[in-house]
Amino acid sequence: MSLPATKPVYDRVALIGLGLIASSMFWAIQRAGLAGEVTGYARSETTRDTARRIGLCDRICDSAAEAVEGADLVVLCVPVGAMGQVAAEIAPALKPGATLSDVGSVKRHVIETVSPHVPEGVHFVPSHPLAGTEHSGPESGFAELFQNRWCLLVPVEDTEPSAVMRLRRFWEGMGANVDEMEADHHDLVLAVTSHTPHLIAYTMVGVADDLRRVTDSEVIKYSAAGFRDFTRIAASDPTMWRDIFLTNKTATLEILGRFTEELFALQRAIRTGDGQHLFDYFTRTRAIRRGIIEAGQDTSAPDFGRGAKGKA
Ligand code: NAP
C-alpha cells in the first residue's frame, strides 16, 4: 500500500466522468494524499447524486466547466467515443498551465479528437491505466485498482517534459508502474492483449447463449472455469467496448485476421489428427502464461486463487 505523499502532486484535480476508473482514482488519490482537492462531474444527475451519497470527490459539480475551473490536472474518464465532445465542452474553462489527460483505452483516436480543442498553454498528456474490472459506475471503484498495474503515458509531440514527469509521479502515487509509449504502438499492443481477447470472449459467450436455447440451462449449470472467465470478460460495459472497437479499427482487424488464420490451422490439425501441431502450439502458449506470472501481472494460484475462497 502506498504511504500518504508528503506533499500533493497537484493542488486541484478534476475528474470528468465518474465511473469505475474515476472512482478508483479518487479513492487512490485520497489514500495517498496526492491532491489538495478533487472535483468531479458526470453528465447524469443520478450519477452525481450517487457520487455525493458515497462521498466520491471532495466536491461534485453540476457542470463540467465548473469542475475544471482552477484545476491543475483534468482527467477525462468517459468512453473513448465521447472524449472529443467533452474536451470541446471544457476547453474554454481550462486554466493556463494546467495538464489535460484522459484514461481512454484507445490512444490515437483520443489524440485526434481531443488535440484540436486543447488551448495554447495547456499540456495534453494522454494516459491509459491497464487495470479494470467488468464492473462500471461510481460505486464500482476501489483504491487498490492500480496497485502494481501498468499505466501507459502517451505524450503528444512537443509536450513539456515536466508535465509528463508530474503525471508520472501522480500515477506512481496511486500505486501504478508507469511507462511511455507511442500512440499507434499502444493501440496495436492493446489490440493483442485486451481488445481482440474481449471480442473473442463476447463471441464465445454469444455462441454458448445460442446453444443454451437448445440445451436449456446446461451451459450455465456446468460452466467450468474456461467459459466462466469468458462470461466475466463479456459482462464488461457495452458502451465502452463498442467505442473501443469503433476507434481501434485498424489494429483490431489486423490482429483478428491473424487470429483467424491460426484458428483455421488449429481446426485443420484437429480434423487431420495432427497431434504434434496441437501439442507444440499449446506448449508455446503455456510458456506465455508463465511469463505473465513471472512479471507479477497475475497469480500462479490454481483457478486464479478462487479455490481458497470456495466458489467465486
Ligand atoms: P464507466 O464506469 O462506464 O463510467 C463512464 C462515465 O462516463 C460515467 O460517469 C458516464 O456518465 C460517463 N459518460 C458515458 N457516456 C458519456 C458521454 N457520451 N458523454 C459524457 N459522459 C459520458 O466507465 P469506466 O470503466 O470508468 O471507463 C472510463 C474510461 O476508462 C473509458 O474511456 C475506458 O476506455 C477507460 N478504461 C476502462 C477500463 C475498464 O476496465 N473499465 C480500464 C482502463 C481504461 P453517467 O454515469 O452520467 O452516464
Image: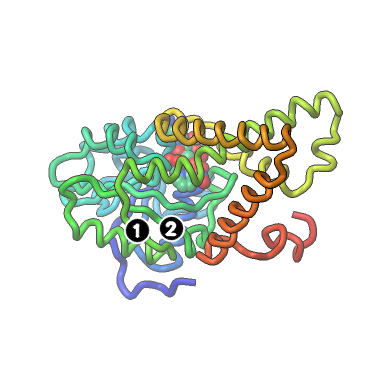
Task: Give the position of the C terminus as an image quadrant.
Answer: bottom right
> SS class of the residue under badge 1?
strand
Determine crowd level at label 2: few under 14, some 14-19, many 20+ residues with C-alpha closer than 10 A: some
Determine crowd level at label 1: few under 14, some 14-19, many 20+ residues with C-alpha closer than 10 A: few
Marks 2 & 1, CB-CB < 8 Å contact:
yes
Q: Which residue is mark 1?
A: 179
- Horizontal placement of 49 versus 158: left or right? right
- Horizontal placement of 213 versus 101: left or right? right
Say which label, 2 or 1, has the lower sequence index: 2
Q: Position of residue 38 (x, y in %)?
A: 37, 55
Determine the image quadrant of residue 108.
top left
Front residue of 4/165: it is 165
Q: Which residue is pictured at 70% across the width and 40% down the height?
A: 274
- Horizontal placement of 241 versus 173: left or right? right
Q: Which residue is mark 2?
A: 150
Q: Which residue is pictured at 68% across the width and 49% down the height?
A: 279
Front residue of 188/89: it is 188
- Would you say residue 17 is visible in this rendering? no
> Mark 1 is on which residue type?
Asp
